[in-house]
Image (cartoon, grey):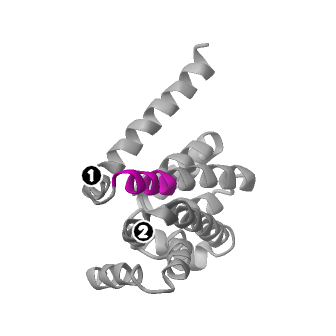
Amino acid sequence: MLRRLYDYTMGLASRPQAKTFLGGIAFVESSVFPIPPDVMLIPMVLANRKEAWKIAFICSVFSVLGGVFGYLIGIFFFDLVGGEIIEFYGYTDKFLRFTEAYDEWGVWIVGFFGLTPFPYKVITIASGAAKLNFAIFIFASVLSRSARFFLVAWLLQKYGEPIRLFIEKYLGLLTVAFFLVLFGTFVLLRYWV
């Protein structure tokens, strides 16, 4: 079933209303949908490289708006819906550790997982359930989601089809390495300087 959903989502990228579909997919992926918007972003940018920035912008804006919806699920409907979503993705045991770490590390948690292939909806719901400061949540979401989608769009715009396989294979690893350097710099500045 997941493969059919993936193929269907990929097929939306070639339709005339693809940008509308992309916005919708980016929105629901940040709160409940299992397929990431990259599935549409990549073929859309490859098909029209001149529109790469516009496509990345749409994806970023609607991903953050969907993240706000996930945050609201976490605050107001966690007992009713949020817990079921967390359980569906297999993160129930880890969820308690997430919420405990949010007081000190919330901005870094949202920033890191917003960049990676990790299911962003888990983070948005966890942020609401942990009552992470909303301004911090928005700040980290805008930075991380925009960085992710604009980086993918830029690479596709610059290198075209050959970079697609590289992105699909190594983007998660590269974003983790980038984040570790960024986080390490923060820790160094905060505790040793």
**Number of residue marks:** 2
| Identity of the residue drawn at 53% across and 77% down | 19
Looking at the image, is 56 positioned above or below residue 192?
A: below
Q: CA distance from mark 1 to mark 2?
A: 17 Å
Which amino acid is tagged 1? Phe
In this rendering, would 165 be left or right of 106? left
| Identity of the residue drawn at 69% across and 73% down | 76
Mark 2: secondary structure: loop
Looking at the image, is 131 positioned above or below residue 8?
A: above
The span picked out in magenta is 148-159
Within 10 Å of disc 1 (Cα), the crowding (few <14, some 14-19, many 20+) is few
In magenta stretch: residue 35: no
The residue labelled by disc 2 is 36
| Identity of the residue drawn at 33% across and 45% down | 173
Q: Nearer the viewer, mark 1 or mark 2?
A: 1
Task: Considering the whole magenta stretch, tell me its main secondary structure.
Answer: helix
**For residue 166, which numbered disc appears in the image?**
1
